[in-house]
Image (spheres, rainbow, N blue to C red):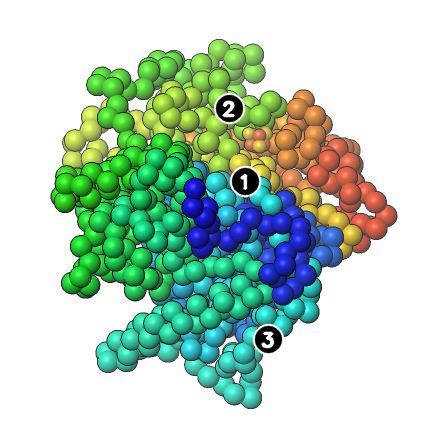
Amino acid sequence: MTTPFASAPPRPTEADATSAVRQKLAFKSGNEAAALAARDIGFHLMGYFPITPSTEVAENLSKMFANGEHSIAMIAGDGEHGAAGICYGAALGGGRVLNVTSAQGLLYALEQLPVQSGTRVPMVLNIACRAVSGPLDIRGDHSDLYFALNTGWIVLTARDPQAVYDMNFAAVRIGEHPSVRLPVLVAYDGFFTSHQKRRIRVFDDATAVKQFLGEPAAYPTPLDPEHPATFGAYMNDPDLINNKMQLSLAMDAAHDVIRDVFAELETMTGRPYPVLDSYRMQDAEVATVLLNSAAETAKEAADGLRQTGHKVGVLSPNVLRPFPAAEFRRALKHVKAATVGDRADSYGAGGGNLALEVRAALQIDPENGTLVLSRIYGLGGKDFYGGDAVTFFEEAGTAATTGTVAKPFAYHGATPGVPNGGPKPGLLPIRTAEVSRGMATVRRDDRTGRLQVELEPMWKMTEVPSRVAPGHGACPGCGIFPTLHQVYNVLEGDIVVLFQTGCAMVVTTGYPATAHRINYVHNLFQNGAATLSGLVEMYHERLRRGELPASRDLTFVMVTGDGGMDIGMGSALGAAHRGHRMMILEYDNQGYMNTGAQLSYATPMGHRTSTSETGSTQQGKLYHHKDTAQIFAACHLPYVFTASEGYPEDLMRKVAKAQWYAKHEGLVYGKILSFCPLNWRTADDGAEAVLQAAADCCFFPLYEIEHGHTTITYDPDAMGRRHPVSDWLKLMGKTKHLLAPASAPMIKGLEDEVERRWSRLKAMHEHPLL
Ligand SMILES: Cc1ncc(C[n+]2csc(CCOP(=O)(O)OP(=O)(O)O)c2C)c(N)n1
Ligand code: SF4
Ligand SMILES: [Mg+2]
């Protein structure tokens, strides 16, 4: 065997003779490494929005913050677009800024990326790379990262947790260098790197770290009234092309800066990061080129092939922007053929981005005859094993021997599927007659103009077959499905549902199965309302044109979580103002539960979530819950209501009214408090007590607003059932910390706000115009 590691970083050992700074061993995942680096760098501010698999970075930092281990200002955006805006503003303010995202999150933020590079404002954005939707897939590939290649950001890649840690330090230095001044992406593989723990070395010498980073250079900022400046001027021909050329020159300059910063980092840590990592390439005749973690698999495959006399090697860039074209030319000079694997396709281009750029790099060297094969592999997190790497080497070997490439571009690892082998049919679709049972009778009171609802006895409701089948994957005791059953019990006739991303969606539609027995659509939770409104209008237009039978009578319902009413608020308000005939039903479980219980804006103050941790210096969420019902009330909708799974009759009455209004007048919004035993940290059968207590302490008042008139439908004061907020808080593990004496000011703040909102609501209830 020849030297196993020609240029890759050596494995960490306790004693490190080559390192100039004290380090200690740790056993960390990529996400943990990114969080530790953030703490050690001491960013001023982090703007973020949770998305798997990158969320853990913010969660780890939240834990550390709560325990006083750093003082990075952590701001949860209303979505990734908002988070990117927060970061841009903060970076304009002159401090060091961090963001972390993945997949759809990166795409949702994408529009902001050229804004930031175009104005030359450095910051660091970590991407735990994940497949871009759709279909929705949470596992790792590079389809998100590739969208960012043309944004003018420097792109560093990190093949393992150690590299994630190290690259974050490098990113700060490179981005802030006066001849670069660009934001920097650090891209590592979702799950493969973000979640797998490895032995890494972390700094144990704050002074040396400080010295390496230096102070951020002083540049004009909008925070300096002595030197007013315009940031982001309107710019047309010919200035824009000059602006872009300067950006391009900054990318060129970054080549040398990156090399120098990596060299300094090596002196400091003992870990080399060549711009192009090359493994056993000195005499290689055949090569495989791969990005990040898959390259490590290929190195092991190369070792095996070397033992049987094959001259093979592996190339893997540590930097994608600026693209290391010269380094590729040098490394491939004497290589006969190379297979370039891309974990994302550039559809229709005849190759993945990496393959096309390697080809382009070689093309300008008349002496280079390397044949390049492009292979798309590992999409949606499909594993890449040693055997796959061997195939890549073999395919390149055949090309080297024959002097031709039989297949310049192909997918590797895709299977053709089984003819006629579609998803197995599940429960039969529900028939209209089965669900048109008249469980609620709705009529308008001519005197008041309001709707009156008569419900059939509750026992009769059990006869209505459910539109959602059992056997879904929700946690035991989850409140979403009892809530949905209550809703479905009174909805008459044919329903079309759109579920936004969240627990309700994820646990019911794992391909090839579905729990939905009616027409169901999913769109991501930033845009469900717009999507459903389009469908509603197409329905009416096709009815009008006679393309659908006049007898077709559909009700359109969007189901969303409270998180969906953060990131999707713009889309929902747009639909509300346009007044489409549809319902938006929000099940409010007070957090982003599907991604591991991060705070949503609906999370009440003081409640613990994985991004509003509790510890010696922080007790849960720092600000009050969003009053989404009142926001929709301000849109002057025909009907707005709040309800709780714990008050089924009240809920069903309101849903029956909502359906009437959604069919006859326009958009209706309802917010339903929904139990989440897992993340509220209660017993699975604790729903009744907790939901009742939330209403009895007036935290979650039950009311409706019909054509602008507010009616409280459950008044704990009048019923003699009013309890203090603490009676509700003591029922949940997520709020137990608030009962400690140290949290008294927090409880007082929550109680005061609950009382203020309740008194306001009562005043509206009593006022004839409100
Ligand atoms: C653009 C984008 N950002 C983030 C995510 C990750 N994500 C999926 S569901 C979800 C939380 C949804 O919260 P909520 O709407 O309250 O529903 P719940 O999970 O609580 O049922 C998040 C953050 C995503 N899928 N897309
Ligand atoms: S995490 Fe909560 S909301 Fe999601 S399925 Fe489990 S109990 Fe239901
Ligand atoms: Mg939620």
What element does badge 1 sit on?
loop
Q: Is residue 365 left or right of residue 489?
A: left
Mark 2 vs 3, N-terminal side: 3
Mark 3 vs 1, N-terminal side: 1
How many numbered badges does the structure rendering display? 3
Q: CA distance from mark 2 to mark 1?
A: 25 Å
Q: CA distance from mark 3 to mark 1?
A: 33 Å
Q: Which of the labelled discs sits on residue 34, or is there none? A: none
Check disc 2 and give the amino acid type.
Gly
Disc 2 crowd rating (10 Å Cα; few below 14, some 14-19, many 20+) is: some
What element does badge 3 sit on?
loop
> Assess mark 2: CB under 8 A from ligand 2?
yes
Q: Taking 485 as reference, is 628 above or below it?
A: below
Residue in the picture at 56% in, 16% down: 458
User: Is residue 622 or residue 274 the one in the foreground?
Assistant: 274
From the image, tell me which residue sits under label 1: 196
Check disc 3 and give the amino acid type.
Glu
From the image, tell me which residue sits under label 3: 215
From the image, tell me which residue sits under label 2: 473
Spot occupied by residue 368 in the image (x, y as percentages of width and height): 19, 58
> In which quadrant of the rendered view does residue 319 lie?
bottom left
Spot occupied by residue 450 in the image (x, y as percentages of width and height): 49, 36
Q: CA distance from mark 2 to mark 3?
A: 50 Å
